[in-house]
Amino acid sequence: MLPPTAMPLSPITALGPLDGRYEKKVSELRTYFSEYALIKFRVHVEVEWLIALSLESGIAECQPLSARTISELRARTVSFSLIDAERVKAIEATTNHDVKAVEYWLRETFAHIAEVERIKSFIHFACTSEDINNLSHGLMLTAAREHVLVPALQRIHDKLAALSHTHAALPMLARTHGQPATPTTVGKEMANVAYRLQRAKSAIAHAEVLGKINGAVGNYNAHLSAYSQLNWAAFGQNFVESLGLVFNPYTTQIEPHDYMAELFDAVARANTILIDLDRDIWSYISHGYFKQKVKAGEIGSSTMPHKVNPIDFENSEGNLGLANVVLRHLAEKLPISRMQRDLTDSTVLRNMGVAFGYSLLAYESLLRGLDKLEVNPQRLSEDLNANWDVLAEPIQTIMRKYNIADAYEQLKALTRGKGGLTQAAMQAFVKTLPISDADKVTLINMTPASYIGIATTLAQKI
């Protein structure tokens, strides 16, 4: 065994699979959840706070910045680079405080602009670190939700809807409790999930993202000590809302993160729906209802050459489980903070990208699996034709229509646990019933494949 050594970071030496084996599949999330991203969002919030103070507060000592200077400040925020972030980290090595390092970087970076130099004392004015952090986290979540998470879920929904329409009328034996049950259609089963996912996606998209900028314990103490005449609560609300966030007027030193719990719970619910889908598709494949397109060169088993394993659905299920473990810990932990502030949320919040990373990885695996699916109509038909006893339901229902005694019990005696009941046997029983000729014809002409209710219509409407 080699002694432990420090290894250079690369996808093959990364401690975790999101930055290692799966790095290319989730790399877009670095834009929103990396250390670089957090620093960049902090710079954005600090710059916008300075601009708002100069233009909207009416504070005489904070002279209005010119349009040209504002444009330069915002452009520099947009162009914030890895080199810039490394400089902030270098400053942090001295300050041992990440947000203060951003403040010092801003002073250093814009020292050449006379207008900024004159009002540099208003950079981070009256702010506690959490004023900057909570707004940065809110912007990170908003952007990642809009540009990555919701679009990925929409792609899954669209694929499911397409499968619903394509196979709307293709009969399939349902399996309640894993046993043969009333038939449905392949498309209708896909539509069920598409509808659930649409609701879950909507909950994610419409979850409020809150923010605050009210000082050390949420009362604008420092603000009022300097400028008591200013309505800081209204000013803070306008600023938070200008960032596209919902203003929270009641906080301690931290925004209490209840909205985060709501958002993370919503994502976990969507993930749970997809775990359900992964397991069902896995089962349908095992029953032969679906085949999987074979990829050239791909190996299913190191010893069994014939295997085409449902690995995409298994990968998706596993990663959704990991995502939900992290999401639920975030949702349970973040709203809890001792007294007016403790730092347990700080380290936990750095794992938002982990939760979203495993989610995104799972979504991509699921999509890849869905793209490989090929329906097997022959197997579906065989399964239906082997289970004529599922027509016990409509037969006993029509018997009830005629008030025939013990209708359910008669069909139970005929079918339950028997298996292999033939079409002829079912039709022979129907012919003995004291019902109208029209209803007899209906039942005699009925097959497991035709007994699908309005499944086709429902699948086409999704």
Image: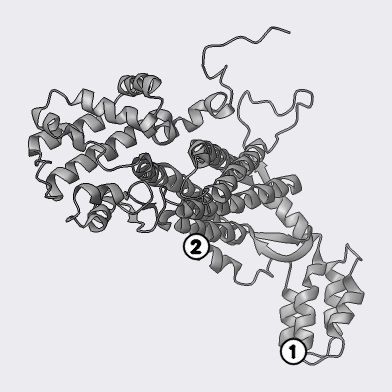
Q: How is the image coloured?
A: one colour
Q: Answer with left or right where residue 42 lies relative to residue 347.
A: left
Which residue is the extreme one toward the bottom? 403
Q: In which quarter of the image is residue 429?
A: bottom right
Instruction: Please say if 4 is above or below 328.
Output: above
Q: Residue at horizontal 20%, vertical 54%? A: 228
Q: Position of residue 100 (x, y in %)?
A: 33, 30
Position of residue 117 measured from the top left corner of the image (x, y, whole percent): 13, 29
Q: Where is residue 183 in the image (x, y as percent from the top left)?
A: 70, 65
Residue plotted at (74% across, 32% down): 307
Residue type at tag 1:
Lys
Q: What residue type is labelled 2?
A: Ile
Answer yes or no: do the residues labelled 2 and 1 have beta carbons within 8 Å?
no
Residue 152 x %, y %: 46, 44
Q: Which residue is drawn at 71% across and 29% down?
A: 300
Closer to viewer: mark 2 or mark 1: 2
- Camera-nearest residue between 87 and 400: 87
Label 1 secondary element: helix
Of residue 399 and residue 193, the one placed in the foreground of this image is 193
Query: Hey, which quadrant is residue 129 in on the image?
Result: top left
Marks 2 and 1 sit apart, C-alpha to C-alpha, by: 32 Å
SS category of the residue bearing label 2: loop
Using residue 421 as the reference point, say whether residue 83 is left or right of it: left
Q: Which label's residue is closer to the chain start, 2 or 1?
A: 1
Q: How many labels does the image show?
A: 2
Mark on residue 401? 1
State which quarter of the image contains the N terminus.
top right
Residue neighbourhood size for the residue with mark 2, other residues' Cα within 10 Å, grouped as few (<14), some (14–19), many (≥20): some
The reply, left or right, for residue 168 in relation to residue 40 is right
User: Which residue is identified by label 2?
Assistant: 462
Which label number is shown at residue 449?
none
Answer left or right for 158 relative to 449.
left
